[in-house]
Image (tube, helix red, strand yellow):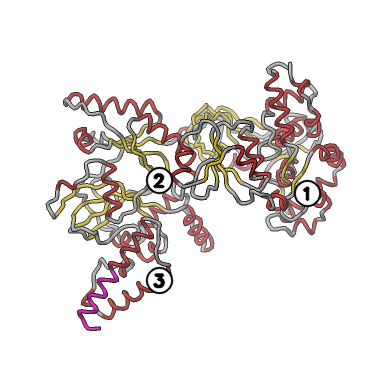
Amino acid sequence: MNKKEIGIRIGELRRLLERHRILYHVHDKPEISDEVYDSLMRELEKLEKENPDFYSSLSPAVRIGGDVIDHFEKVTHTVKQWSFDNVFNFKELLDWEERNLTILKKENIKETPTYVAEMKIDGLKVILTYEDGNFVRAATRGNGEIGEDITENIKTVKSIPLVLPEKVSFIVIGEAWMKKKDLERINKEREKDGLALYANTRNLAAGTLRQLDPKIVATRNIQIYAYDVEQTIDNRQKTTDYPKTQEEELELLSKFGFLVNKDRKVCKNLKEAQTFYEKWIEKRHTQDYGIDGLVIKINERKLWDELGYTAKSPRGGIAYKFPAEVVATKLLDITVQVGRTGAITPVAELAPVLLAGSTVSRATLHNEDEIKRLDVRVGDTVSLRKAGDVIPEIFDVFKELRPKNAKTFVMPTNCPSCDSKLSRIQIGKELSAALYCLNKSCEAQHLEGLIHFVSKKGMNIDGLGERIIETFHDIGLITDASSIYKLTKEDIEGLEGFGEKSASNIIASIENSRIVPLHRFLYSLGIRHVGEQTAKDIAKHFSNFKEISEARLEKLSGIEGVGEKVADALVSYFANTSNQKLLAHLIPNLKIISEKAIVDGKLFNKTFVITGTLPKLSRDEAKDLIEKNGGKVTASISKSTDYLLAGEGGGSKRDDAIKFEIKIIDESELVNML
């Protein structure tokens, strides 16, 4: 090829690679394989290397071309970077709207605003500058007026364009974020190298953008969602094309090749925004990225501009935060409870506080060693979180707020239930961190074992909660797990707090639990060290429960995920005479389904979501039916959902199913599938 042909070929390759970048990284609709894309990129790299006259800093081939630097230069923002004020409930959101309407009324503006609800992604704000359609600079927010130049790092991000399809000059605001799976991958690599781990995806995104070597950034797979356009200057003088609404701005960004989050909603009023918010409180956990709330923006640009700014925030937008998952509260006391295995757990009694949507007044402190590690004392102000989004736990102490009369906690020497002497037990070659009550007749252990047996992850007997188990045990209705299956409606009906309907519901739930997957039955027995996942690992290797109960130590310890400690606990449990008697009375009441039977089930590997009120089945009954036939039930619709089981009522889940083209079935169709 001559010089002219080479130039034409380079231009064609650049345009083609940019088109496929948008298809892959923005629209998630690749038209060519990675191998083909890579081969086109190699050709471009070769031509540019051999023909330096055609070099361009905006070529797709030089996204990772920046040199290692020793520091970041400071950048003064052309437009001040504001931050949104926060609200935490619907009343505060309505108050925000009322303030805005009052301002608009004073200006004789009668137009009622509509709103756009967007995800508030837990990432890092970045400011991208384009001149004549070319990417020229990227900066962090910094203090809102001065940030740091991270241009070379941002050039490695394939979800942003380096050249726009039109010669416009503007500033684009976006959020840099990392996928949860990339956090896991990078932390595994750092763990091998003995490096500190990133605590969450936001820390990873921030740490990545502050890397001094762009080549490291390129390996991290950082993403950027664009969400705002500022200081637009259209060099073609077509000012009529300027977006008049926030939704039009987002559509323009998408048209120009930016990655724009599609999980948003244009709302006629704040009631619609509230419905969208409530839908995402739980759904946020199913996403690739961290979300800590919504950003509610007035859609009409002219109203946004009319409202202006406070000293630190735009009036036209507000951050509507999700219920807190980390809060501070006061530790009022430390008590202890006896678990089903005899483990003594210290429990923090707290000043009630709202955490992740529920009021929390108690939290686990795990064991005596943990109390010493935290150096937590009664009277302290503590940081509280939900471990695994379920169990509240204390993870830090504000020692600077410690009162002079704060009390050091001392673990008891005797069981608070039966007064037996407490001791640490041998686990492998070490002593346990927790103290144990070794009295097998301890009443507290017995009760905790029954509560564990009926729990959702165990036998899933709905209606038999902790309080009811304690009541039935106190009056002699329940003595052990097998006695649950001897209960009748007449036994329950007429007791204080129970009528015909509630008695019938409990008996129906007991009947439903008679058919149980092998792993759930094994978990329900409360064998020490046998958690939910371990029970699943064990159940996969045996055809029935009898085989597990008769298995030798060597076979059990050879199962991946089990090990000698768990195997020893299993063998000891099944060798115990009292446990043998219990199982002899319990098993004839049940039909225990092997994991193989579940795999062979007609719904194996199918994912369902349930919404609305079904004609005959309760939601729990429908869930059990699906799971017993090999299916899986999840809380929210996603692309991996196979069926939406819909009854009367149900709202947004139907809309999501239609959006994702997921088959909607009713109860009769589910039954016909079996």
Determine the CA span between mark 3 and mark 2: 34 Å
- The answer to whether any part of residue 367 appears in the image is no
Position of the N terminus, as image quadrant, is: bottom left
Residue for point 40% across, 61% down? 30
- Can you give x and y, in whole percent of width and height, for residue 202 in the image? 41, 49
Residue ID for mark 2: 122
- The answer to whether any part of residue 81 appears in the image is yes
What amino acid type should be assigned to the residue bearing mark 1?
Answer: Leu
Alpha-carbon neighbours of circle 3 within 10 Å: few (<14), some, or many (≥20)? few
Magenta stretch: dominant SS? Answer: helix
Determine the CA span between mark 1 and mark 2: 43 Å
- Can you give x and y, in whole percent of width and height, for residue 623 in the image? 63, 39
Q: Is residue 613 left or right of residue 418?
A: left
Residue 293, quarter of the rendered image: top left
What amino acid type should be assigned to the residue bearing mark 3?
Answer: Val
Q: Is residue 533 left or right of residue 666?
A: right
Position of the C terminus, as image quadrant, is: top right
Residue for point 46% across, 43% down? 658
Q: Which numbered circle lies on residue 570?
A: 1
* Residue nearest the viewer, comparing 525 with 267: 267
Q: Is residue 509 left or right of residue 303?
A: right
- Can you give x and y, in whole percent of width and height, for residue 656 in the image? 46, 42
Residue ID for mark 3: 36
Alpha-carbon neighbours of circle 2 within 10 Å: few (<14), some, or many (≥20)? many
Lower position in the chain sequence, tag 1 or tag 2: 2
* Residue nearest the viewer, comparing 432 with 467: 467
What amino acid type should be assigned to the residue bearing mark 2?
Answer: Asp
**Start-end of magenta stretch:** 1-14
Secondary element at tag 3: helix
* Number of the front mark, 3 or 1: 3
